[in-house]
Amino acid sequence: PQGTVQLSPTESALLQVLVHHLGQTVTKEQLLEWLWQGGKYLNENTLSVNVSRLRTKLSSVGLDQTIRTERGVGYRMVDDHE
């Protein structure tokens, strides 16, 4: 993978959390709590939109399969060899 992408502060925080928990599923609830301090006015759609944007940006530098959706649970970042 090569190149750089501009991430929003939220996308950057999301990426940091997923990298920190590489290979582990992070629940949607955990992500909402950590990224938005449990923002009462946010829902899973807000999270989905941010994950989608992050995936799009990562795929532009060849990292298109790194964030996996664990249906009904959350998200997991994997390395390219998994």
Image (tube, rainbow, N blue to C red):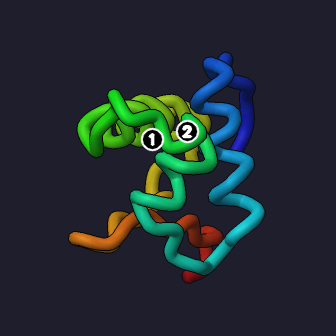
Position of 8 compared to 51: left or right? right
Q: Mark 1 touching mark 2, by CB under 8 A?
A: yes
SS state under label 2: helix
In the image, what residue occupies the spot 60% across and 69% down? 80
Position of 55 compared to 58: left or right? left
Which one is nearer the viewer's eye here, 28 or 15?
28
Looking at the rendering, in which quadrant would you find the C terminus? Answer: bottom right
Name the residue type under label 1: Arg
SS state under label 1: helix
**Residue 30: where, in percent of width, then height?**
52, 60
Which one is nearer the viewer's eye here, 67 or 71?
71
In the image, what residue occupies the spot 28% across and 45% down? 44
Q: Which mark is residue 58?
A: 2
Neighbor class of circle 1 (other Cα within 10 Å; few <14, some 14-19, many 20+) is some
Q: How many marks?
A: 2
Q: Which mark is residue 55?
A: 1
| Quarter where residue 3 is shown | top right
**Residue 29: where, in percent of width, then height?**
43, 59
In the rendered view, tell whether residue 70 sits above or below residue 40: below
Could you give the CA–CA distance between mark 1 and mark 2, rounded to whole angstroms? Answer: 5 Å
| Quarter where residue 21 is shown | bottom right
